[in-house]
Amino acid sequence: MTLTTSHSSSAPVTADTVSSAVSQAIHQHRLAPGTKLGEDELSDIYGVSRTIVRTALQSLAHQHIIEIKRNRGAFVAQPSLTEAQEVFEVRELLEPRTARSAAQKATANDVALLQDHITQEHTAIDAGDRGRALYLSGKFHVEIARIAQHQTIADMINVLVARSSLIIALYWRRESAICESQAHHALINAIGDNDAARAEELMQSHLVDLHSALNLKELPAVEQDLRTMLLGNQGR
């Protein structure tokens, strides 16, 4: 969910609404690591109380997407070099086995949903919306965990994918941070064929390739306008 203005819907804006909007902005690299998330500014942007904002920020902190620093406020998390390594190492342990299970359990409808997911990703790429394409690319991995019917692992992968988005924003050394379409298409084919061993192998090599594309050097400085990053031109 992306909020375009603080009064974009007649539905009440809740803490979950705010946390989802901020999370998606982080996924899409509209909010860079290190960006300060001021409670007053977020309250103004979304037209809600500071209590609602504070609850949303606590939820995001629990997912390790943001950091709340005592006497300084909330900031989009800046994963360290060690954290970057660990996140991808954990993904390399979890996701290949999850892909295996997904291949064993996938239905024709599941495969169609994955294919539609990639179609949306390509549409975003063609439209020049790199942020949305990146977001969809990450969610593709979460969807595979859902198909595997591993809810606990799916929840973990969802958090790991969000943290990976931050890591990619900081350390990616290729021209695009979007998962290669060939890798995702191959995964869909293996899952559609119920080829568990192939799906596991493809996911493993895909994640190793992503990990190898990280340029683990010092963090860059970040200066951004929060309203513009969250709302784009509509925030002006």
Image: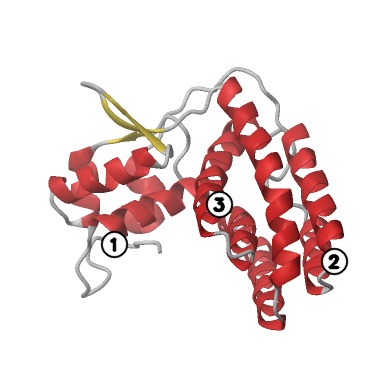
Residue lying at 64% horizontally and 56% vertically, measured from the top left: 141
Q: In this view, does 214 lie above or below 118?
A: above
Left or right side of 47 for 128: right
Left or right side of 42 for 215: right
> Cα distance, mark 2 to mark 1?
45 Å
Residue lying at 72% horizontally and 82% vertically, measured from the top left: 108
Amino acid tagged 1: Thr
Is residue 178 among what the camera can see?
no
Q: Residue furthest bottom?
A: 108
Count the numbered circles shown. 3
Is residue 37 among what the camera can see?
yes
Marks 3, 1: nearer the viewer: 3
Left or right side of 76 for 178: right
Crowding near the residue tagged with mark 2, few <14, some 14–19, many ≥20 C-alpha atoms within 10 Å? some
| Disc number for residue 153 | 3
Q: Is residue 6 above or below residue 95?
A: below
> Cα distance, mark 3 to mark 1?
34 Å
Residue lying at 74% horizontally and 41% vertically, measured from the top left: 210
**What residue did someone put label 2 on?**
195
**What residue did someone put label 1 on?**
5
Amino acid tagged 3: Ile
Sequence-first tag of 3 and 1: 1
Crowding near the residue tagged with mark 3, few <14, some 14–19, many ≥20 C-alpha atoms within 10 Å? some
Amino acid tagged 2: Asp
Residue 196, percent from left and from top = 81, 62
